[in-house]
Image (cartoon, rainbow, N blue to C red):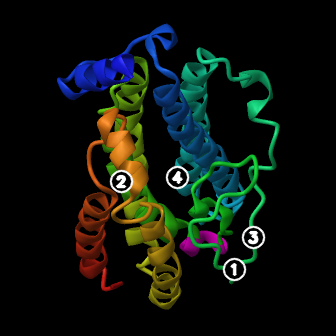
């Protein structure tokens, strides 16, 4: 108990941890859960978006989509390397689950996780063509930036450094998504499809921020793995994407 109080006091005062050898068991478990969720989400997101590359209307759009697929897999690899220092088997991780698998389009799984799969629930839903993929990328791209900004403040220093390195590329993914959406909306028929996709993806992306007033957040906050409540991050996302959608006549 003394050690537990000491470590929480140390973290509360702005201290950071830098080695698995210095990490207490509860901290280790929570940190691994956060990392697994990120890695699984990036692998699933990359696998799902890969299927849409050939739906892209032009060469530049294909290049942008391929870059997102590549970089999301790379981001997963970077965090997985941190997990390996805690004993994770990185060699089997990418192949142990069908990352491209999806539920039915009209399914509603809420915040459910699948056995052996820690991806955010949104990455269980399928994309439906290029316009739908672009809309999802705009909404989830902005959510990813906000969520990674939060994770870049984690008290485990090696992981924080990885997230800080990843963040500029995730911002670029969001920018590419918005640029792509502006382009597709130049076609009059795309507006109707895009509005339907916004209606479909908006609540599912919102759910990726987790439950409000989460008891688990309190634990993570004490360990300084997390800092900002889910509802605050969600509100920030809503303000930002609502402004974007309004400017594009999509809200």
First of labels 2, 4 by sequence position: 4
Task: Answer with mark 1 or mark 4, whichever residue precedes in sequence.
Answer: 4
Q: Residue at x 57, y 56 (%)?
A: 120
Element marked by disc 2? helix
Q: Which residue is mark 1?
A: 107
* Residue 162 placement (x, y as % from top left): 42, 25
User: On the rendered image, what quadrant is the N terminus found in?
Assistant: top left
Give how far apart the Cα atoms at labels 3 and 1 are. Answer: 7 Å
Q: Which residue carries the number 3 mark?
A: 103
Q: CA distance from mark 1 to mark 2?
A: 29 Å
Q: Which residue is mark 4?
A: 60
User: Badges 3 and 1: C-beta atoms under 8 Å apart?
Assistant: yes
In the image, the segment drawn in magenta is: 128-132
Front residue of 209 and 202: 209
Q: Nearer the viewer, mark 1 or mark 4?
A: 1
- Which quarter of the figure has residue 33? top right
Coordinates of residue 92 in the picture (x, y in percent): 80, 28
N-terminal label among 2 and 3: 3
């Amino acid at each position: 108990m003394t050690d537990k109080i000491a470590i929480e006091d140390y973290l509360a005062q702005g201290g950071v941890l830098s080695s698995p050898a210095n990490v207490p068991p509860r901290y280790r478990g929570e940190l691994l859960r956060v990392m697994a969720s990120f890695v699984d989400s990036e692998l699933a997101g990359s696998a799902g978006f890969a299927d849409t590359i050939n739906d892209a209307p032009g060469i530049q759009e294909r290049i942008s989509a391929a870059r997102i697929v590549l970089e999301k897999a790379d981001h997963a690899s970077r965090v997985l390397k941190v997990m390996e220092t805690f004993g994770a088997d990185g060699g089997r991780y990418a192949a142990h689950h069908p990352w491209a698998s999806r539920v039915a389009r009209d399914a509603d799984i809420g915040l459910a996780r699948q056995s052996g799969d820690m991806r955010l629930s949104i990455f269980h839903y399928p994309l439906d063509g290029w316009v739908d993929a672009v809309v999802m990328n705009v909404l989830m791209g902005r959510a990813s930036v906000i969520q990674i900004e939060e994770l870049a403040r984690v008290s485990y220093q090696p992981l924080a450094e990885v997230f800080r390195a990843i963040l500029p590329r995730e911002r670029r993914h969001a920018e590419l998504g918005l640029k792509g959406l502006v382009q597709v909306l130049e076609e009059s028929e795309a507006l109707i499809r895009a509005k339907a996709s916004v209606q479909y993806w908006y609540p599912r992306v919102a759910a990726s921020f987790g439950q409000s007033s989460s008891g688990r957040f309190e634990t993570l906050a004490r360990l300084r793995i997390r800092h900002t409540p889910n509802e605050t991050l969600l509100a920030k996302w809503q303000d930002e994407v609502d402004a974007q959608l309004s400017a594009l006549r999509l809200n």
